[in-house]
Image (tube, rainbow, N blue to C red):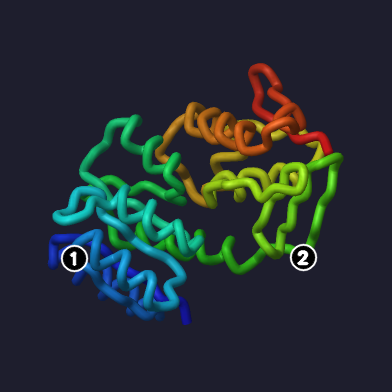
């Protein structure tokens, strides 16, 4: 049974998400601010976090950064901010998803299920190409022997490209398969994450090839 940490300074939002999560069979923990979220995530086994952005004491973005120093746990950000900049910033700090308020609790639970399914269905492979080593079961990437500091979404994107090594994949396909649902964004979201992923791969960035007018492929 997966455990979900629900973080929001509005009690009613926490109550609604808790009810829907428990109906789906999940265990829940709650926090009303970022500082409590960091403490609870540190002291408990948490499988996924639903994190509000605007909160007292410590905002959601800062809380995610602190949590990620010790744990690689999937995060869904909640926010009333709808600007693309805010969404991309959330992805850059490592969020797996970004949901704007007001939201449908059923939709949030669908996204939770999709993320947890991906997190528990990793293959047992280790791929080595030149100085690039991808440890799929261990969720580690090594560049010339040094562990790359990658966000969970960068890893998901790389994993999907590797599974389809040499195949051309459209941006739309990447949005559907990597994000796992009908993503409310555009192609720039993929491009931003590809840019981040290439930066993480350092001297092997060119293994990800841009296909003008279509999308991307990886050549290992």
- Residue at 57%, 29% in the rendered image: 195
Q: Nearer the viewer, residue 101 or 55?
A: 55
Relative to 35, residue 193 above or below? above
Q: Which mark is residue 140?
A: none
The answer to whether residue 125 is seen in the rendering is yes
Left or right: residue 27 versus residue 207 is left
Q: Which mark is first along the chain, 1 or 2?
A: 1
Q: Which quadrant of the figure has residue 111?
A: bottom left
- Residue at 76%, 35% in the rendered image: 218
- Residue at 74%, 57% in the rendered image: 135
Q: Position of residue 143 (x, y in %)?
A: 73, 43
The answer to whether residue 177 is seen in the rendering is no
Q: Nearer the viewer, residue 59 or 147?
A: 147
Secondary-structure class at tag 2:
loop
Left or right: residue 220 versus residue 51 is right
Q: Which of 45 and 216 is in front in this view?
A: 45
Q: Which quadrant of the figure has residue 125?
A: bottom right
What is the crowding at mark 2: few (fewer than 14 residues within 10 Å), some, or many (at least 20)? Answer: few
Q: Which mark is residue 32?
A: 1
| Total count of labels | 2
Left or right: residue 213 versus residue 77 is right
Secondary-structure class at tag 1:
loop
Q: Which quadrant of the figure has residue 132?
A: top right
Q: Which mark is residue 124?
A: 2
Q: Where is residue 30 in the image (x, y as percent from the top left)?
A: 25, 72
- Residue at 15%, 60% in the rendered image: 9
């Amino acid at each position: 049974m997966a455990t979900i940490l629900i973080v929001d300074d509005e009690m009613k939002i926490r109550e609604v998400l808790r009810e829907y999560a428990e109906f789906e069979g999940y265990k829940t923990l709650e926090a009303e601010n970022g500082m409590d979220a960091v403490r609870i995530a540190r002291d408990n086994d948490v499988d996924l976090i639903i994190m509000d952005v605007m909160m007292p004491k410590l905002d959601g973005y800062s809380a995610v950064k602190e949590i990620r120093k010790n744990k690689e746990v999937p995060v869904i950000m909640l926010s009333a901010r709808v600007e693309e900049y805010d969404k991309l910033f959330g992805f850059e700090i490592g969020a797996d998803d970004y949901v704007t308020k007001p939201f449908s609790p059923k939709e949030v639970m669908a996204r939770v299920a999709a993320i947890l399914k991906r997190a528990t269905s990793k293959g047992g492979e280790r791929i080595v190409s030149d100085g690039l080593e991808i440890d799929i079961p261990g969720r580690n990437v090594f560049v010339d022997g040094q562990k790359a500091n990658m966000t969970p979404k960068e890893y998901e994107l790389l994993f999907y490209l590797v599974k389809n090594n040499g195949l051309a994949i459209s941006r739309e396909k990447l949005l559907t398969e990597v994000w796992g649902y009908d993503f409310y964004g555009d192609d720039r979201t993929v491009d931003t994450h590809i840019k981040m992923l290439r930066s993480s791969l350092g001297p092997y960035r060119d293994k990800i090839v841009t296909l003008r007018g279509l999308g991307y492929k990886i050549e290992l």
